[in-house]
Image (cartoon, helix red, strand yellow):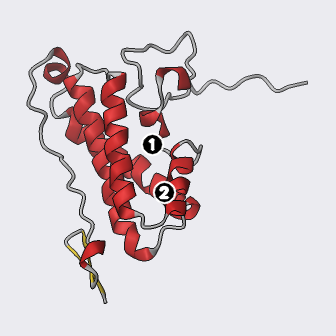
């Protein structure tokens, strides 16, 4: 018997109870970034949940053969990663230190290692992490993994959002 209640997965087997708390609280830090961007973590987090978590989860469901009873835990783990990353970004004054990014990724890895019960699923999760279908990949990328153009400004090693095109189109090829 499987019952979903209040965003938590309850199963007959207590070992399958998986709940990843999502910290949407205000970052308690007083730096220039948080002064200039009040409630950034909450605003950006809500946007990332809508724009990136769903599509990333769908691709992970497909690549790692996520079973229906694992889906709520998968969504919770991705949301928790987003808010961990945003917390580190705000604490870093609008930049994320590579060590903080790696800590966020390690926490996410641990969440998925406890959620997925097969070695194959864990391996496929790690394949998905670097796959183009992972819309959260830009939060996980190292500085070397990010392609920037000279015209793109950068305040941090990892961008807070994907680059937005200028809307200009190139002339047709002849």
Q: Residue furthest top?
A: 150
Report crowding for label 1: few under 14, some 14 to 19, many 20 or more residues within 10 A (C-alpha).
Answer: many
- In the rendered image, the quadrant that contains the N terminus is bottom left
Q: Which residue is mark 2?
A: 122
Residue 115 rendering spot, x and y as whole percentages = 36, 63
Image-based side of 43 in relation to 73, left or right: left
- In the rendered image, the quadrant that contains the C terminus is top right
In the depicted structure, whether residue 31 falls above or below residue 61: above
Say which of 32 and 105 sits in front: 105
Q: Which residue is mark 1?
A: 136
Residue 6 rendering spot, x and y as whole percentages = 19, 71
Residue 119 appears in view: yes
Q: Residue furthest front?
A: 119
In the depicted structure, whether residue 14 falls above or below residue 138: below
Say which of 32 and 171 sits in front: 32
The residue at 21%/41% (across/down) is: 42
Image-based side of 169 in relation to 166, left or right: right
């Amino acid at each position: 018997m499987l019952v979903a209640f209040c965003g938590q997965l309850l199963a007959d087997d207590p070992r399958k109870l998986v709940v990843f708390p999502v910290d949407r609280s205000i970052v308690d830090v007083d730096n220039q970034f948080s002064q200039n961007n009040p409630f950034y973590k909450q605003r950006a987090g809500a946007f990332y949940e809508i724009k990136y978590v769903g599509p990333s989860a769908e691709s992970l469901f497909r690549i790692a053969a996520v079973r229906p009873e694992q889906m709520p835990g998968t969504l919770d783990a991705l949301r928790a990663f987003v808010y961990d990353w945003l917390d580190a970004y705000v604490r870093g004054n609008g930049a994320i230190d590579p060590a903080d990014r790696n800590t966020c990724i390690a926490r996410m890895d641990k969440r998925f290692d406890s959620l997925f019960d097969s070695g194959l699923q864990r391996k496929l999760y790690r394949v998905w992490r670097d796959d183009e279908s992972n819309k959260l990949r830009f939060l996980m990328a190292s500085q070397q993994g990010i392609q920037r153009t000279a015209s793109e400004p950068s305040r941090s090693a990892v961008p807070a959002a994907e680059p937005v095109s200028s809307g200009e189109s190139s002339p047709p090829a002849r």
